[in-house]
Image: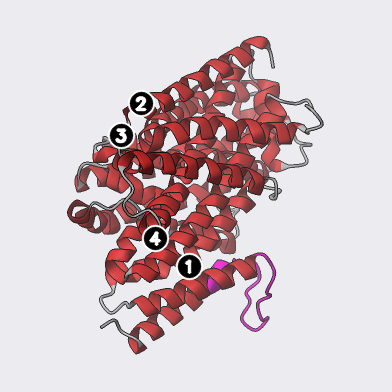
Amino acid sequence: MSLIDYAVFAAYMTCVLAVGFYFYKNNSTAEDYYVGGREVSPSHVGMSVVATDVGGGFSIGLGGLGFAMGLSGSWLLFTGLVGAWLSAYFVVPRIKALDEKHKFFTYPDFLRHRYGERVAFLAALISGLGYLGFTGGQILAGAKLASKTLFTWSFLGLTPLQVSLLLIAFITLCYTVAGGLKAVIYTDSIQWGVLLVGLIFITIPVSLWQVGGLSGMYEKLPAQSFSLTAVPPVTLINWMVTIVPIWLIGMTLYQRIYACKSTKDAQRAWYIAGILEYPIMAFAGVFLGMCARALLPDVGDAEMALPLLIKDVLPVGVKGIVIAAYFSAIMSTADSCLMASSGNLVNDLLQRYFYANADDAKTMKMSQVATLLIGLLALLLAAQFNTVLDAILHAYAFMVSGLFIPTFGALFWARSSSRGALSAMVLGGLFTLLWKTKVLALPKVISVEGLDPIVYGLTLSLIVFVVVSLLCPDD
């Protein structure tokens, strides 16, 4: 990295921080801080949705999949298109109609309206912990990028990866704690635009030129890299079952539904997000991973291939812009997850049970402190994972298996009961987490090789939910 690249990166990060502090001065209520004053345009919300869902974690992960699998890795983000458009048609109108009547702030607010206090409390715990883990995954993604591009040296006994973990956490915390959801959405929108431009119009052309064009790619990569059918069916099922349901239970997504002015605006935002995920980002990400494999075939960690490609291939100045863009994508997810976890802690737990009469000033201060503390916990958690996708998919699995079935029932099944929801949340979430972390092993008679434990967790959650709801209906 040259001094020019460092200067470009520093200038970009300074602008991001400035946006956060601008909204710090303009936020006066919890509604401003957590739902953007309910007045954000669909284009900004749509960009923020895709930035949050894909972010740097999946961006780095997509590069790794492109390196290992080729074009078939793009199916990972096809789940985003499916989830976004199904949600836009079936879910957004129902949630926005309720929000316009009751002025919700969080995802558990919806469950509280449908099932009552106990279910909302448990949902807040599951959602808050899940997004804490998800934030850790994003911080790790940023650290992997920085340790191979910006900070390749040790400092005060810290490894490059540890130095990078501290850097990405510091920058993200600064503007998120200060500016709230408006800062998150507007920086997301800008950051995602910069990332797409940086990838499509700079990184891909330069990488193709370095590898000798498409003909060079065909010479240096195996034929299956150019196939869309090289993904094992069980892997595609795992991706679908793990990721699509998040569009029904994601706290970050509910906050953005609430931030839109109307149902039509929210639906428009979701359609924008879907098309940006697939095919645009899906193919850009895996194609760059393929370029990395053609140019750097001996990289041991597939997820490190893309950072090394940026470091070794791009020219001076351009390198700083692209690295800043990737950092932005990573931060665009980390900041949203921080806001989600903070919203669960403050709105669903602290204010409801301990500070019910807090005024706007106290609520704002409490929200900022909560966001800071959650960010520090996520930093500690990030050091415990080896790969970005492991961290992300563990967090997804925990939330989806615990929350999806009760939420689906709340939206579409009139006989859903609060007891059924509680039972499904506890058993589904707990057993999936224990199976996924190998604390428990699935019996061989029901185990299908390669199938993610979340499939079994969701099945268990569904059976328990239906049986208990029928046996123990609400009064």
Q: Where is residue 363 in the image (x, y as percent from the top left)?
A: 37, 44
Residue 354, magenta (yes or no): no
Dot 4, crowdedness within 10 Å: few (<14), some or many (≥20)?
few
The span shown in magenta is 437-457
Instruction: Say which residue label 4 marks.
Output: 353
Between disc 2 and disc 1, the foreground one is 2
Q: Which amino acid does label 3 sit on?
A: Ser
Instruction: Say which residue label 2 marks.
Output: 25
Dot 1, crowdedness within 10 Å: few (<14), some or many (≥20)?
many
Q: Which amino acid does label 2 sit on?
A: Lys
Q: Residue furthest right?
A: 157
Q: Where is residue 243 in the image (x, y as percent from the top left)?
A: 48, 56
Which element carries disc 3, helix, strand or loop?
Answer: loop
Q: Which of 464 and 158 is in front in this view?
A: 158
Q: Which amino acid does label 4 sit on?
A: Tyr
Residue at 71% across / 22% down in the picture?
A: 312
- Mark 2 to mark 3 CA distance (whole Å): 8 Å
- Mark 1 to mark 4 CA distance (whole Å): 23 Å
Which element carries disc 2, helix, strand or loop?
Answer: helix
Going from the N terminus, do you reach mark 2 or mark 1 first? 2
In the picture, the quarter occupied by the C terminus is bottom left
Between disc 4 and disc 2, the foreground one is 4
Q: Nearer the viewer, residue 214 or 457?
A: 457
Q: In this view, does 51 lie above or below 233?
A: above
- Mark 4 to mark 2 CA distance (whole Å): 29 Å
Numbered circle sitting on residue 28: 3
Q: In this view, does 469 lie above or below 164?
A: below
Q: Which amino acid does label 1 sit on?
A: Gly
